[in-house]
Image (cartoon, coloured by chain):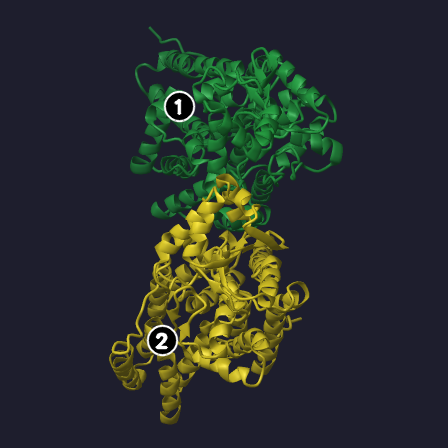
Amino acid sequence: MRKKKVKKIKFSAREYLIVLAMICVIVFGIRLYLAFSTEYFSNEAYFNLRQIEHIRSNGLPLYKDDLSYHERTYFFTPGFHYILAFFSLFMPVSIACKIMPNLFATLLSVIIFFIVVELTKNRKVGLIAAFVVGFIPVLFSKTINSISVYTLALPLMFLSLYFLMLINKDKKYSIHTIITMIVLMVVHPSIFYLIIGLLFYLMFIKQERLAQADSELEVFIFSILLVIWFYELVFKNALLVHGSRIIYKNIPKLLLQNYFAQVNILTLIVFVGFIPFILGLYVMYRYTFKEKKRALYIFIGMGIAIFLLLWLRWIELNLGMMILGVVMVILFSQYTKDLMVSLDKSKVSKIKWLLISGMLLLVILTSVFPSVGLAIVENKKVITNSDVEALKVLKKLSEEPSVTLSTIEESHLISYFANDKSILDTNFLLVKDVDTVYEDIATIYTTPFINRAIELTEKYGVQYIYFSEQAKKNYGIKELKYADEPCVELLYSGNVQIYDVEKCKRKMVIS
Amino acid sequence: MKKKRIVFTDIQAVIVLIVVATAVLSIPLLSREVKHKGYPIGEESYFNSRISKDLVTIDNLIYGGRNVILNPYNLLLYGGSLLFDMHSLSKFLPFILGLVSLLLFYFLIRKKLDITKSLLTAGILVFSPIFMYNFLVSSKFALLVVLNLALLLLFLKNRRMLHVVGLLIFLGICFFGLSSIAISVAMLLGLVIYDKKLFKPFLTYLILVVVFVFGYLVPFGKIFFNKTPEFAQIGILQRMFTDLGGIIGFGIFAAILAVVGFIQIWSNNKNFYYSLFLVLLLCISLFFTHEFMFYLNFLIAYLVAHAIIVIIKSKWSLDFLKKLTLIIIVCGLLFSSISYSHRISNIPSRGIVGVMDFLQKRDKGVVFSSYKYGSYIEYTGNIAIMDSRFDYSEVEKRIIFIDNVLSSSTTEKALVELEKYNIKYILLDSEMKIKAKETGFIEVLKSGAFNLLFVSEDLTVWEVVW
């Protein structure tokens, strides 16, 4: 009997793009749903929100902040804030800050699709990669409601890598690469990690004795010099004060562990995604020691660079995992392509798509659900209406901005909602004696002695103490131990307590 | 039509270098004339001018006194002060030595390089932070560098008469100490490796070294090593790079280009192995002392120039990118230079200048302050508890004393501490005031036992009322 030939269904390029668009809609839709499930943003987002609003009203970022206790200068590249300020011309600022970062993050799926198609020459694999990259747990959960600059930095980073891949085909992509890198440079300093990744890539090429493309090297040399010069200009004063320790952003030693935490495999598996991480590692091994594929080395180089930086704790944990997650998805797509090819040649070719679907199901279970779950957990940390109510009460207490003690995480909320000064926020550069300041904040919250608390509140000119659930969690306390003192006035009580300590200072002066 | 190439002659190159160096070195000096009452730049200038004025060998303006080993630079300053006032001499002598060193360096490298490369190397040298420091601050290195360059030029001539002059110069270098001898010998050895004919004259120098070290330095106890205490140390990266806060260091851009130049030469040219080895050795030595930076700077300038010429001569697939890269390089080097020039022209700050002016007019006594202000306090004729040379006794004890005073929360406690060193004045900066605020010492100062005498920017001077 003759075997029945299986008719292969061929899709057109347009149809693939439609499927890609559908994937983007799904990712974007879920992101927006989670974003709009709360009215507010995460605590750290309010720094960016203030910057965007300031750009809208004054045309310039808020570099010198009167609401910071030290009235110091902030050091950052404002590209992201300008872009969001531009979009806020067409819609309310808060809506723009909900929609646009999530849109940027979704566009990463498009970029990864094209990267993977270029790498594997297989659009189906591209679609799988586009879907998986949309649900990297750490990237998904940390960027829904945080007006995170990473939502734009990561797409730009991988867009640069995409253009770099195409340089060998057509030199015109050199210009595309440079322009994308320049935009990334103005958005976020993570361009340094891109350059380190490229350095590893060039080392790989040399090691494997592959022909070095002149234009790649030229783009690399130009970009490294440009980036160093640009950041020397922007961070000049911070570099003079902090030197090489600027990598650690002058973060207090007690907090450093939170930002530059020691990474372990379990953390990576959970936050990067089990399947992409494991299979990405396998592809790294295979194409480093067993086979050669030039185009993959860009991403293998990037992956090794990030691993090294995470191990040395020279990159923030979350950012490192985000970049690594995307790299692993790209490498995982190479595995998928290889799997398809080997399945095609094997006896189980007929059930190839069943196996691929099984793998996808595993990805959904180990990446998609954790992403959504973690995002819901992050959303619970977002400020609530009652917290905002308390902050508005704080605002009404005085016409002029006064100093309010809060946890570092809530300092931007104090500035944004209550228009008050905070002692220390999450921007630590140029803060003198930051360890002492951080310890003093902890002491004011935890000391049982009113005299010690007043001594420190006087030192910083604190008038109000904002005592929230965050403070209870941070310092393991249920209440302020001196709250019962007659001079400590409770001005507001709800989810949050607001205390006025001004009378205590006057009492100490008199006594 | 052929492109017309601009060709310099040596004389034109020299004129260009003199004009550029004059401009680069003049700007900070002029800035100080306008903003800082013409006070010299750099802490060392004040120590050297004070010691050289009367050829002081026992310095009594540091509490407990210390021995001072004079060097030829002190003698030169002393000699110059017979004709000019020390204040002006401290500014103009390094400036003149800078121009001389630049010309000597130019003629030295002209022996091996063409005019363009020599001009570029010397030009990069002029804009380097270390060159600016060395020839704006009145320190022994200004003279040492000139002597070493002259020595190398004379040594290369390989004529008996000039060798004798060279030996005399080398003898002068020997009086600067062991590390200066070591670096001079290493540089001469480098020349010998390239030209074996110089071996015999080199032996003469070696003999001189041995005689000098064992005949003078060792028996007269002239060998000593100063170690900067831990509290005064800054990170190695911060020390080496001016862009990261170092005062004597390299620009980051220059360092990157120097590495490119180094790799290029290493892979292509075996003849330069010794020089490259010397560069590596000097880099390693930076972990221990900054003295070698002044010499390393010349090699770095050469490596940077080499890297730039390699980039210019190389064929890029994207020509516009090459031009942009060169523009970035020039901007990067210039930025480091301008930024450093601005920084160094503010050392010491207006606040310190104001305090010096004030203290000079007051009765003399012991001044309590941080080691950072020691040299300036001594310059006013007052006695400092500590200064940044750390070549006096009981350094740790003095640190504890300063800490105890700043931690005094009562007047009685403060006075008991201050009496140990017979303190007459207290000079506080913003950092010390922060600590004083925490401990309550700032409140103690407001009591009747202290008078606030003077405020200059972030510095305050108090008098102890005994």
Please determine whether, in this image, residue B207 is positioned above or below residue A180: below
Bin the neighbour count of mark 2 within 10 Å (Cα to Cα): few under 14, some 14-19, many 20 and up.
many
How far apart, in angstroms, are the residues tagged by discs 1 and 2?
60 Å
Determine whether B246 is above or below A102 in the image: below
Dot 1 surroundings within 10 Å: few (below 14), some, or many (20 or more)? many
Query: Do the residues bearing badges 1 and 2 touch, measured as CB atoms within 8 Å?
Result: no
Colour used to depict chain A in the structure image: green
In which quarter of the view is residue B75 placed?
Answer: bottom left
Q: What residue type is labelled 2?
A: Ser
Q: Which of B345 and B66 is in front in this view?
A: B66
> Which element type, helix, strand or loop, lies under badge 2?
helix
User: Percent position (x, y) of residue A341?
Assistant: 37, 23
User: Chain for mark 2?
Assistant: B
Q: Can residue B157 be seen in this view?
A: yes
Instruction: Return the x and y of residue A410 as percentages of the image width and height.
Output: 56, 24
Q: Pick the quarter of the image with the N terminus of chain B.
A: bottom right
Which chain did the image draw in yellow? B
Q: Could you say where residue A50 lies in the image, as x and y percent from the top left?
A: 66, 29
Residue A127 visible to an observer of this rendering = no
Instruction: Tell me if residue B417 comes above or below residue A264 in the rendering.
Output: below
- Report the side of A380 relative to A350 (left or right): right
Camera-nearest residue between A135 and A250? A250
Relative side of B29 to B104, left or right? right
Mark 1 vs mark 2: give the one in front: 2
* Residue bearing mark 1: A276
* Coordinates of residue A465 in the picture (x, y in percent): 57, 23
Q: Mark 2 points at which residue?
A: B184
Both labels 1 and 2 in a single chain: no
**Element under label 1?**
helix
Observer-nearest of A292 and A344: A292
Residue A314, numbered circle: none
